[in-house]
Image: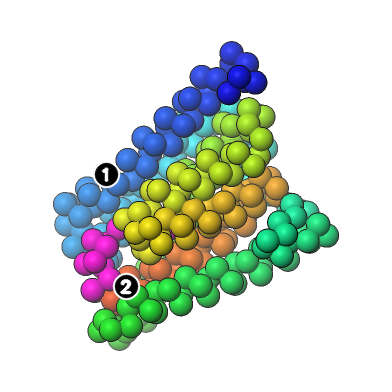
Amino acid sequence: MSGLDATATPLLLAALTGLAAVSAGLFGAAHLARNTGGKDFESFQLRYQAISLTLACAVLAAAGALAPSGWSRFARMGEIGAPAGPVSWLGIAPSESWLEVGLSLGFIITVATCGFLVVQTRRNPLRSSSLGRLAPFILAAALANAFTEEAIYRLAPAVVLHGLLPPSVIAILSATGFGVAHYGGTPGGPVGVLMAGFLGWILARSLLETGGMFWPVAIHGLQDLVIMTFLAVDPALQRSRRMSRAP
């Protein structure tokens, strides 16, 4: 941190402290949702998403006040087809765009998430008959959760830390916070931390390289759509994770 000037250092410390505090706030929101009548999937998600969305709006307001220039740079859709930074071990070539990378990685990560949950729930009885009735609610909860978590773990750090740290460091910080926060999520445990951390790193890169929220929310929303569907039809999964947050 020796390269940071006197103005940047308190902003960086505020952002790091804030990320930890907001993560604790999300866990508190889940507790509050459960303890105020959120005993089934619908009632829990309705309470949790309302509380967490309010928290996300407060975080964005603080980030925008701290760094107005970062806000104007990242608080938008972004350039969907912007060039993607090469990552050889992921097969991302220097000539590829985020339109190509976003579609391919979004598909692969979604299939992997679905496969993991199929294996995890293969012995559980499912209430699939309620899926049609719950479909609109599942979609709304998935989109709300994706926006909330992208606002907190991707947009806010990028807004505040842009220009203070290299983009690669911002992406790692975002991924670390996101991964650790999902230890009790779905999927959870050490595997869940690694999966969420990898997803967080990909989504942070997409935000920083496209200058906007389209790909982070779109890719995250697909994962949450799969996860919310499993949570809605699998009571055993709900109980095992205590209806905790989706990644």
Task: Establish if 8 lies above or below 204.
Answer: above
Q: Mark 1 Cα within 10 Å, few/some/many (few <14, many 20+)? A: some
The vertical placement of 96 against 112, above or below, is: above
Percent across and percent down for residue 143 are 47, 60
Q: Nearer the viewer, residue 138 or 228?
A: 228
What residue is disc 2 on? 232
- Secondary structure at badge 2 equals helix
Q: Residues within 10 Å of mark 2 (few under 14, many from 20)?
A: many
Looking at marks 1 and 2 on the same chain, the residue that comes earlier in the sequence is marked by 1
Please give the name of the residue rendered at 57% of the width and 61% of the height, measured from the top-left corner: 218
Res 122 quadrant in image:
bottom left
Q: Is residue 220 visible?
A: yes
- Residue 197 percent coordinates (x, y): 49, 53
Residue 104: name its quadrant: bottom right
Q: Is residue 143 visible from the viewing direction of this image? A: no
Q: Is residue 109 magenta?
A: no
All told, the count of numbered labels is 2
Which structural element holds mark 1? helix
| Quadrant where the N terminus is found in the figure | top right
Residue 241 on the magenta segment: yes
Residue 175, given in percent of the width and then of the height, sits at: 51, 48
In x, y percent, where is residue 62? Answer: 48, 30
Most extreme residue toward the top is: 6
Is 205 left or right of 185, judged from the image as shown?
A: right
- Name the amino acid type tagged 1: Gly
Amino acid type, label 2: Ala
Residue shown at the point (71%, 65%) measured from the top left: 91
Please name the residue that numbered disc 1 is placed on.
Answer: 28
Label 1, label 2: how many angstroms apart (C-alpha)?
22 Å
Q: Is residue 15 above or below residue 4?
A: below
Q: What's drawn in magenta, residue-wise?
A: 236-247
Q: Quadrant of the C terminus?
A: bottom left
